[in-house]
Image (cartoon, helix red, strand yellow):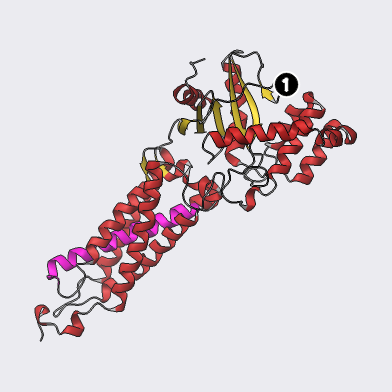
Amino acid sequence: MVADNQLTQPQRAWPWWRGVLLGLISLALALSAYLSWHYLAGGAVMGCGGGSSCDDVLSSRWSSIGGVLPISGLAAGAYLAMLIASFSLGPATPMPVRRLAWRAMLVLAGAAAGSAVWFIIVQKWLVGAFCPYCMATHITGLLLAALIIWRAPREVSSTARVIGGGAAIGLTCVGLALAGVVAVCQWTIVPRAVYSAGESQNNVPEVDARPVPMIGSPDARYIVTMLFDYKCPHCQQLHFMLSDVVRRYGGKLAIQLRPSPLNRACNPYIPRDVDEFKDSCDLAKIGLAVWAAKREAFPEFDQWMFTHESGDRWHPRSPEAARAKAIELVGQEKFEAAMADPWIGKYLETSVRIYGDAGGGAIPKLVFNSRWVTPRPNDTDDLVLILQDSLGLPMP
């Protein structure tokens, strides 16, 4: 019988599965580390511009625990531990260390598989969007788990199996339980006042002499500009908090509405177009045409654009539906005349410039003087705190 320390060179060589294992771990670690860096440093992930599906996922409350601990950071730590353990799986490693390494790998494999399933569910049914980087990490984690669970019971030393099949199942279940703990923490710990903020390159231009779309009075002491897109789900969620916030300030606050479509056809600050926003420019012009044709009809149109009518989530209006609604509210002749009004192009151009001065990226954005914020409030109380902390507005 050959002792572990007397194995031949072919027996010592890494088998194919160890090469695959190392490659998968390295890929998962690199993706997780990159997403962690994005979370901590801010800015857009490569290929995921503001308003894209992957931006929706990475800026959602589900990308962290309590708005403090990034999920990608936990994943990076787990894959780093997996990488370290993977170097102690070979036959040249002393049996106690080898057995410990396999046990750690099985727990981590269970955690990776459970977390992958949880976050795929989150993206599908809670966020309603998929992040390619996240999905690549999840798929890699599932492949890793399958490889480790398949291989662990088959590993033998010169005298016995390294780890039994029952133990392998039990350790995997421990990892699944850890993933469940993370899911429960995410579900129960709701972050408050989540936002990113910064300084614009220039102050917001003075409000036009001609009245513009606004929630509240143009005579308000604080006029905050909201940059939005009629196809943006975060804009839709924020929209229904604005009137309540304006009421809380008792006439001291107004929100100036400025569409900034996430489409290169009318916004040169967008790095690349995505299908979700291909109609954004048309929708913005239709909305502004309603304002230009009949100002008192605009609040009803604006509310209708963001109303959730059926199904389990909000769906943006099509240009055809928006045009039909606009004509219903203001009449065919007035609508066509308003669409030809050069004011629409000028107002949209100014809105887009404000978006660019605020660094582009995700929307909605609230801008006041030279300061901007991209809020993710859970309720009106959160939004009030964000206005105070990031834009310097006083409490109501």
| Observer able to see residue 8 | yes
Which amino acid, mark 1? Answer: Pro
| Observer able to see residue 376 | no
Indicate the quadrant containing the N terminus: top left, top right, bottom left or bottom right.
Answer: bottom left
Look at 12% across and 78% down and name the residue there: 4
Q: Is residue 114 magenta?
A: yes
Answer left or right for 383 relative to 24.
right
How far from the left and from the top, in percent, is residue 212? Answer: 71, 24
Which of these two is toward me, 60 or 30?
30
Residue bearing the label numbered 1 = 211
Residue range corresponding to the magenta coloring: 93-121
How far from the left and from the top, in percent, is residue 214? Answer: 67, 24
Which element type, helix, strand or loop, lies under badge 1? loop
Look at 12% across and 70% down and name the residue there: 94
Answer left or right for 395 relative to 216.
left
Q: Is residue 174 magenta?
A: no
